[in-house]
Image: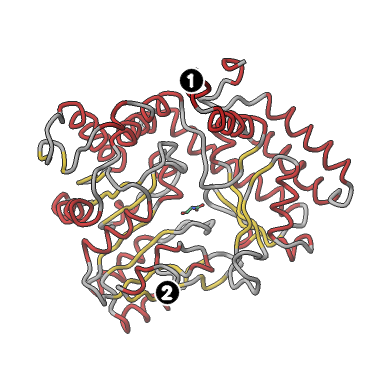
Amino acid sequence: MPSYNALQQSDPLVYDAVIGEMQRQVEGVELIPSENYISAPVMEAMATVFNNKYSEGYPGKRYYGGQKYADIIEQLAIDRAKILFNAGNANVQPHAGAPANVATYFALLEPGDTVMGMDLSHGGHLTHGHPVTYITKIFNFVRYKMKDVETGEIDYDEMREVALRERPKLILAGFSAYPRELDYAKMKAIADEVGAYTMADMAHIAGLIAGKAARNPFDDGFDIITTTTHKTLRGPRGGMILTREEDLGKKINKSVFPGFQGGPIMQMIAAKAVAFAEAAKPEFQDYAKQIVVNAKHMANLFMENGAKLVTNGTDNHLMMIDCVTSWGMTGQEVETLFDDIGITLNKNMIADDPRKPMDPSGIRLGTPAVTTRGMKEVEMEQLTTFMLSAIKKKDNPSAIKDLHEEVKTFCNKFPVPGIDLKQLS
Ligand code: DSN
């Protein structure tokens, strides 16, 4: 870990906030399912002089000079990503997940073309065609949903009917709040029937796919995978677009640069390369499997204690709890209560939620970050007990304060990779 001495000297306000955030991460429990802790090598690669370099173009084909080392790191990231996900092409330049998705739409579609994606209220993502996003002014989005919110089964018959009627050019799999696996083969069959491309936005489950704890959509013939690199994949904040066929990758590359972005963020690409090498190690497979074991265990514990989970369980790293039905509380009330005991998760709409996005009925939580800290089933039991106790004692401020102290003591036993507060004292 860097000493941060120079930062402390030159900008104490920023330094204090950095140290405060480190303390928050160490002393608290992170259950937001899209968050994680990067390793020290990934963090070191991010904080490098590659920040100073402009590298428009691709390895061997750049617009500026001085690319000897930039080419090395970008080619490493590309090659490692291709092996990790069995891809024909990897574009590691997208600055984040949303630009990766938008660049993909522009690579494949003409304005006015139709895209079919999962409804946001059933677990889809804003960038899959939510009306508040600009992209809906350009492309026409149609939706699919779960047939049965008790099992999470997608209505593939309806999806086929809508596809035959609307003739989408792109069928999109992927989600940010759906706790089950999708049937990529069924989606691919529907896409083939209407001549659509298939794209999986696997941002949430990229680490599970890399670690062989979830199915790779390429195995069912999907054309494209987009992802962020900082969630279960445990890399730096950023995005990536993979194609099964090398040729389609050429369209993607043109769309990312010069079509959409300017200079790539080379220090993040260096850190992506490091993270992909980490994810290729056998121990990452153990990590990915444990994420799912932990999530299933926690979900079962909640349900045994009377909580109502959307789809009644999970197959992946996350779960959605209907707080109104479970505890007569809103998602916001539960988020705030758990914040008070040092456990972070997020309020979230549940399927067909009658409440509003900023004040929804549910919460979303997951196990990628706590699993990185080495927690296993027994710790999931402890965490669930903390959360259920908080709900029981919610009207007793001193009991909530005591619980917060217990959570801090518990966290002491599980170091966060890349953070050593003792080095700073
Ligand atoms: N903000 C991310 C998440 O939490 O799922 C998705 O963009």
Q: Is disc 1 surrounded by few (<14), some (14 to 19) or many (20+) residues within 10 Å? A: some
Instruction: Report the residue at 31% width, 47% height from top.
Output: 240
Does residue 153 sit above or below 41 in this rendering? below
Q: Which percent across, then down, holds residue 80?
A: 27, 34
- Label 2 lies in ligand 1 vicinity (Cβ under 8 Å): no
Asked if 403 appears above or below 320 in the picture, the reply is above
Image position, residue 199 (x, y; %): 31, 60
Decide which of tag 2 and tag 1 comes sooner along the chain. Answer: 1
Figure disc tally: 2
**Identity of the residue furthest to the bottom in this view:** 165
Q: Which mark is residue 143?
A: 2
State the image coordinates of residue 269 (x, y, percent, origin top left).
30, 36
- Could you tell me the amino acid type at mark 1? Met
Number of the label disc, if any, that sits on residue 281? none
Q: Residue at x 31, y 73 (%)?
A: 139
State whether label 1 is within 8 Å of ligand 1.
no
CA–CA distance in space, label 2 to label 1: 46 Å
The quadrant where residue 407 appears: top right
Q: What element carries label 2?
A: strand
Q: What residue type is labelled 2?
A: Arg
Q: Mark 2 touching mark 1, by CB under 8 A?
A: no
Residue under the point 37% across and 44% down? 238
Does 139 appear above or below 72? below
Of residues 403 and 193, the one drawn nearer to the viewer in this rendering: 403
Please name whichever residue, 3 or 415, is drawn nearer the observer in this view of the structure: 3
Q: How is the image coloured?
A: secondary structure
To which residue does mark 1 refer?
Answer: 1
